[in-house]
Image: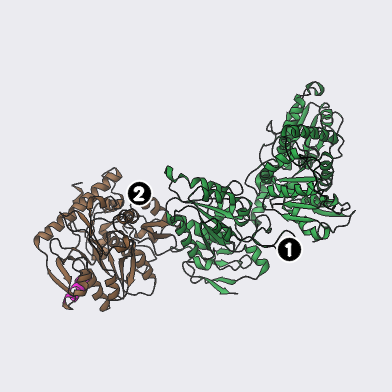
């Protein structure tokens, strides 16, 4: 980390992140020790750990972060002053195989890339997120395509998936891929850049597939709300169609249930208001919907490793790739920039001062271009 | 160790105060002894139970002190001498019956021993039992020595029979639990029970109350006369002392020591009162008239002190000017246990002498020396105690549940869960069964916005003593809480006495064991049973029960007390730590087993930077192997 960032311990994590409702439930602090345990949509600390420095604090995406340092570590280049983060190219993509597309949220690109990476041995373990009945998502380690398919689909509820990564890294897995939300990609990048002696076996991390994310929901309250409208164990799929729909769609075996999105927004985790990353900037590749193009994804290729994988998957017949229409790209950049500006504005409001960017204070230099509008 | 019945009459024996009391009862021909265990009184009925067969008497552990007193009263009504023993809290429990028995009157001698615990070394309150004598209009004796513990107990039966009422005997920790030489007398065999044949319709009733109340006062007046000539009150010192120390019970030893330490035998007199209530007024006034300064030395409340002031208030002309020193003047503290230093200080202060009881250099030296050989310790559960495992699961379940749930506590070894031993889980502690009573109240506040889950913990013996009515109250009034019964097959804290659930009685005879689980099920509530050593299972059951908000739920956490088990079978496992695997202080563990779990069988070896098993202390329960994040604690079947 840069000299300005102090790595502290569990108590500071409680005070600086949890007590301020900044926890994203990414799971990066858990799966490494007996103290931090995710449970039913909350990160619970079972006992006090009085170590002055710990991995939990170092990896948390809401403790002080230097985006320039992370960018150098992950990409070898400074943090760019652009809406979408480091990007080699932005494409449209979809899974080639029908089997994957039929299970997919949109184009099945994530499933296709992960299944391909497993099949070709780029990774031996994929850490994904699934939904058990009742809408509580959990991390799951899979080692074959069937496992990938079982985890296909979005659910919009925060999942402590990095707990599973931490456990796999400590276990027998040798080459791990993770499908991660933006805060989780930030945590994984912090793991790679961590100065602590305990490296958490981070060199086993070979692939990060990022997911676009505007916000995530709090499980417990949202599950109660949803449960009043649809029996939770009958839910097959949920979706948020692109604007101007402004609804939350719930698909069951019978008629779908449509809920006004504004009602769902009441359950957004407060910490999402302090996030500036819509497109998972620290991944090898990032995937989201392609607005107005049913059955396709937007695919951002960021790193060498990401570019290699995409090309291999395309050449290997697992992935179809097309150029992204200009209008889509423009909209994407607009949306991403809006999240950055809103995020920074919310942070300044929360801290009470333009001179205090909370966890992003050490990234003031990296964010200079954005700050003028704040 | 010989039982108290065995010792030969005329011999000198080193006896615990409680043993001396028990021997005194045998020498009075007691036939019936009952009690609920309570520190510092437990050994009274404990030693009578041990001697029961030999002495041909009956002794029982009753479910609570009220029933104990009722059962003993029956013996008295039927002409059998009876003794009941309890701690200060037991007086509270027995008081409902005592406050009608005093009006009723007794037949054969009935002695009630209250042993108080000043400073509450092992109690949930600090309370002086003596005021109940004044409240209930009953005679009260306070032994000051071990010999008196025996002799006054024997005499108490005579007093009780002469007055036809209960005679109270009050001890404290330093009389009950200390030991000294006692010259023994001849035990008397107990008489046979006579026919229960009331001579009038109201002979064994407390009614009509005003009539009986008047009769009770007449008995007390008779007691006063009796006590004027009691050999248990005496005076030592000059005829006209500069200062008169009036003292009772353990205060007498301290007063003797203080007067001697300050070298004031020639000017300070000591009036030792053995018949504390009713006061032998003529004797006391006579001594008060010979001085102008009085220092009262007694344990816990200013009972003797205020009674003396009351007496003086009604007899001003006969005593002359008097200044009282003691708890009222704050020369002695009105709380906490007495010790010789406090009395020396008080006496020195009243006499205007500069003499510290304990020189500061001595204190510093002593602290430095003891620091080398002893460690500061907090009260804690034994190695292998099932309560440690239970509260580990409770702690985790409450944190995971996340709604601010809390535990209402009760009395037993598990009371220590108020502190670090049980991870500070208990949030309330009062009387026997109160945890469940409080929970029954908390559980009705949901309609008023109360959202926190409540878990009432209760031991197996406590369950039988007092918690059943509270549980039924919760069921009947549809309260919402979880009752966690800690069933370790013993009344452990007071010395592993048996209780209705253990299948043995006080005299070691097998008896029907009451099934707690079946009893709870009979109330129609959801009942689950768990093994506390199954940490995961217990945590899950607790979470499930807390989430289920359908009225009262019961979880029985059942496993034998580690010390009881150790007497019956050898350890289940041999434990060791693989120091290579142990993560020690590093991130990922930070000494979970020695720093957080804190079983005394685990030790931190700072030289090797790893935990190790203390083989002397470890009881081989195996639980620590399940909490180690590195699987470094190895459990091998022994």
Q: Residue A285 lies in magenta, yes or no? A: no
Vertical position of residue B181 compared to residue B101: above or below: below
**B57 sits left or right of B427 in the view:** right
**B460 sits left or right of B153 in the view:** left
Q: Find residue A20 and name its label.
A: 2
Same chain assignment for discs 1 and 2: no
Determine the secondary structure under disc 1. Answer: loop
Find the magenta span and give its range.
A304-314
> Main structural element of the magenta stretch: helix, strand or loop?
helix
| Camera-side residue of A224 and B525 | B525
Q: Looking at the image, can residue B264 be seen?
A: no
Percent across and percent down for residue B38 are 68, 51
Q: Which chain is green?
A: B
Report in which chain the residue with disc 2 lies.
A
> Looking at the figure, which quarter contains the N terminus of chain A?
bottom left
Q: Looking at the image, can residue B538 be seen?
A: yes
Q: Which residue is mark 1?
A: B509
| Camera-side residue of A341 and B150 | B150
């Amino acid at each position: 980390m840069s000299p300005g960032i102090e790595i502290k311990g569990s108590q500071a994590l409680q005070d600086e992140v949890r007590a301020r409702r900044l926890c994203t439930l990414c799971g990066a602090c858990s799966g490494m020790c007996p103290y931090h345990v995710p449970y039913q949509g909350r990160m619970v600390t079972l006992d006090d750990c009085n170590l002055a420095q710990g991995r939990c604090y170092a990896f948390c995406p809401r403790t002080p972060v230097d985006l320039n340092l992370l960018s150098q570590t992950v990409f070898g280049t400074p943090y760019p002053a652009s809406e979408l983060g480091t990007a080699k190219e932005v494409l449209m993509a979809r899974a080639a195989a029908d089997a994957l597309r039929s299970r997919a949220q949109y184009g099945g690109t994530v499933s296709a890339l992960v299944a391909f990476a497993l099949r070709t041995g780029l990774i031996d373990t994929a850490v994904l997120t699934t939904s058990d009945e009742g809408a509580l998502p959990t991390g799951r380690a899979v080692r074959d395509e069937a496992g990938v398919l079982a985890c296909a689909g979005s659910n919009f509820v925060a999942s402590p998936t990095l707990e599973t990564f931490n456990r796999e890294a400590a276990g027998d897995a040798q080459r791990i891929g993770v499908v991660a939300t933006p805060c989780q990609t930030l945590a994984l990048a912090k793991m790679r850049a961590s100065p602590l002696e305990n490296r958490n076996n981070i060199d086993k991390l070979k692939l990060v597939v990022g997911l676009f994310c505007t916000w995530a929901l709090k499980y417990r309250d949202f599950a109660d709300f949803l449960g009043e409208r649809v029996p939770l164990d009958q839910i097959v799929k949920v979706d948020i169609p692109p604007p101007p729909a402004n609804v939350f769609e719930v698909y069951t075996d019978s008629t779908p249930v449509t809920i006004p999105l504004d009602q769902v927004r009441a359950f957004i985790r407060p910490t999402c208001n302090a996030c500036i990353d819509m497109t998972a900037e620290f991944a090898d590749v990032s995937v989201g919907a392609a607005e107005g193009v049913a059955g396709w994804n937007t695919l951002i290729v960021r790193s060498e490793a990401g570019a290699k994988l995409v090309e291999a998957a395309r050449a290997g017949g697992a992935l179809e790739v097309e150029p992204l229409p200009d209008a889509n790209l423009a909209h994407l950049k607009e949306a991403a920039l809006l999240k950055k500006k809103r995020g920074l504005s919310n942070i300044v409001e929360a801290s009470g001062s333009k001179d205090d960017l909370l966890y992003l204070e050490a990234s003031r230099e990296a964010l200079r271009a954005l700050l003028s509008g704040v | 160790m010989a039982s108290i019945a065995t010792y030969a009459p005329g011999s000198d024996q080193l006896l615990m105060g409680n043993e001396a009391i028990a021997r005194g009862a045998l020498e009075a021909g007691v036939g019936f002894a009952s009690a609920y265990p309570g520190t510092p009184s437990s050994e009274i009925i404990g030693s009578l139970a041990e001697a029961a067969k030999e002495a041909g008497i009956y002794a029982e552990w009753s479910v609570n002190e009220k029933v104990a007193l009722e059962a003993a009263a029956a013996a008295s009504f039927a002409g059998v001498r009876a003794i009941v023993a309890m701690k200060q809290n037991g007086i509270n429990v027995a008081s409902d019956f005592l406050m009608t028995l005093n009006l009723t009157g007794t037949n054969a001698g009935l002695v009630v021993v209250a042993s108080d615990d000043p400073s509450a070394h092992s109690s949930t309150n600090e309370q002086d039992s003596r005021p109940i004598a004044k409240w209930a209009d009953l005679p009260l004796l306070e032994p000051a020595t071990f010999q008196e513990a025996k002799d006054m107990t024997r005499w108490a039966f005579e007093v009780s029979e002469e007055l036809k009422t209960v005679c109270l005997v009050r001890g404290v920790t330093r009389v009950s639990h200390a030991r000294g030489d006692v010259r023994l007398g001849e035990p008397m065999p107990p008489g046979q029970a006579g026919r229960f044949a009331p001579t009038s319709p109201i002979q064994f009733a407390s009614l009509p109350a005003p009539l009986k109340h008047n009769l009770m006062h007449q008995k007390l007046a008779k007691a006063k006369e009796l006590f004027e000539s009691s050999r248990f009150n005496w005076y030592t010192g000059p005829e006209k002392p500069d200062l008169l120390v009036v003292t009772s019970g353990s205060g007498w030893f301290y007063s003797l020591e203080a007067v001697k330490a300050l070298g004031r035998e020639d000017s300070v007199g000591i009036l030792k009162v053995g018949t504390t209530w009713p006061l032998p007024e003529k004797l006391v006034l006579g001594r008060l008239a010979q001085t102008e300064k009085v220092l009262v030395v007694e344990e816990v409340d200013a009972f003797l002190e205020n009674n003396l002031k009351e007496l003086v208030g009604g007899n001003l002309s006969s005593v002359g000017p008097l200044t009282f020193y003691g708890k009222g003047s704050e020369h002695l503290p009105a709380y906490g246990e007495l010790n010789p230093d406090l009395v020396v200080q008080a006496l020195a202060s009243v006499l205007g002498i500069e003499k510290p009881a304990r020189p500061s250099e001595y204190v510093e030296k002593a602290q430095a020396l003891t620091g080398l050989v002893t460690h500061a310790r907090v009260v804690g559960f034994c190695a292998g105690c099932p309560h440690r495992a239970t509260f580990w699961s409770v702690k985790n379940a409450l944190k995971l549940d996340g709604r601010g749930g809390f535990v209402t506590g009760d009395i037993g070894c598990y009371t220590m869960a108020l502190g670090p031993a049980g991870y500070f889980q208990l949030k309330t502690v009062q009387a026997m069964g109160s945890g469940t009573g409080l929970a029954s109240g908390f559980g009705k506040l949901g309609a008023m916005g109360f959202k926190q889950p409540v878990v009432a913990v209760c031991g197996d013996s406590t369950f039988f003593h007092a918690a059943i009515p509270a549980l039924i109250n919760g069921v009947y009034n549809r309260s919402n809480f979880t009752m966690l019964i800690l069933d370790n097959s013993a009344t452990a804290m007071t010395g592993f006495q048996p209780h209705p659930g253990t299948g043995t009685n006080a005299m070691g005879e097998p008896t029907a064991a009451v099934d707690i689980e079946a009893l709870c099920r009979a109330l129609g509530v959801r009942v689950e049973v768990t093994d506390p050593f199954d940490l995961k299972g217990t945590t899950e059951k607790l979470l499930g029960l807390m989430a289920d908000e359908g009225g009262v739920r019961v979880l029985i956490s059942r496993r034998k007390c580690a010390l009881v088990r150790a007497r019956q079978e050898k350890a289940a496992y041999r434990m060791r730590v693989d120091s290579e695997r142990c993560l020690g202080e590093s991130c990922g563990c930070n000494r979970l087993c020695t720093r957080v779990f804190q079983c005394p069988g685990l030790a931190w070896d700072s030289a090797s930077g790893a935990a190790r098993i203390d083989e002397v202390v470890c009881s081989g329960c195996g639980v620590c192997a399940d909490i180690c994040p590195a699987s470094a604690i190895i459990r091998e079947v022994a």
